[in-house]
Image (tube, rainbow, N blue to C red):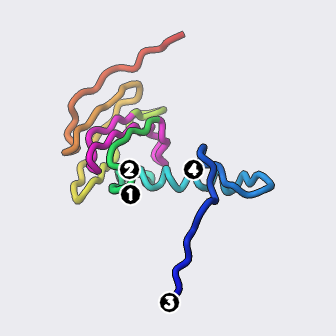
């Protein structure tokens, strides 16, 4: 068997290195990264389902939008979930959080930032402030 090396294809800003500029590839790549960090449907949020733990051992992402109209912030350390913050964007809702074999049902009040720990236990809920 012969081994083929892949080199290039992406610039440092993660845009695709292919003329002309390919918007579908650039947006598609960003969507693929987001799906590695959060997968969702109307009733479930799957946290860190497919991210490369060995390549990204530590990190945070904020403002991901789930299909259930929830904004998601996630931090991980040493390849494991550290904390997750959720905001129900328009209405109170119930969703199911999934991570590493754990699954819990949570109620989210609109207008609040809800913080959960690595065990998916709610550690606090604080009202969002309107900065006008």
From mark 3 to mark 4, how far is it between C-alphas? 33 Å
Name the outermost residue toward the bottom.
1
Left/right placement of residue 6 relative to residue 40 reads right
Q: Which residue is mark 4?
A: 30
Q: Which residue is mark 1?
A: 52
Q: Sequence order check: which comes first, mark 1 or mark 3?
A: 3
> Mark 2 and 1 residues: CB-CB less than 8 Å, in contact?
yes
On the image, which quarter does residue 119 sit in?
top left
Query: Would you say residue 41 sits in the magenta stretch?
Result: no
* Badge 1: residue crowd in 10 Å (few <14, some 14–19, many ≥20): few
Residue numbers of the magenta segment: 63-86
- Where residue 45 appears, as percent x and y from the top left, is 37, 50
Left/right placement of residue 130 relative to residue 123 reads right
Q: Nearer the viewer, mark 4 or mark 2?
A: 2
Q: Which residue is mark 3?
A: 1
Q: Camera-side residue: 127 or 19?
A: 19
Q: Sequence order check: which comes first, mark 4 or mark 2?
A: 4
Q: Nearer the viewer, mark 2 or mark 3?
A: 3
Name the outermost residue toward the top.
132
- Where residue 113 appears, as percent x and y from the top left, is 35, 27
Residue in the picture at 33% in, 55% down: 53
Residue in the picture at 62% in, 54% down: 10
- Where residue 102 appears, as percent x and y from the top left, is 21, 55
Residue in the picture at 31% in, 50% down: 96
Secondary-structure class at tag 3: loop
């Amino acid at each position: 068997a012969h081994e083929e090396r892949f080199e290039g294809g992406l610039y440092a800003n993660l845009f695709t290195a292919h003329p002309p500029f390919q918007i579908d590839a650039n947006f598609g790549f960003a969507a693929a990264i987001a799906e590695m960090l959060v997968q969702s449907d109307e009733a479930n949020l799957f946290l860190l389902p497919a991210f490369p733990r060995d390549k990204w051992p530590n990190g945070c992402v904020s403002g991901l939008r789930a299909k259930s109209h929830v904004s998601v912030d996630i931090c991980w350390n040493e390849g494991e979930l550290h904390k997750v913050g959720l905001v129900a964007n328009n209405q109170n809702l119930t969703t199911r959080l999934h991570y590493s074999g754990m699954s819990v049902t949570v109620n989210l009040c609109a207008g609040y930032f809800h913080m959960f720990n690595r065990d998916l236990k709610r550690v606090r809920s604080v009202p969002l402030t309107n900065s006008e």
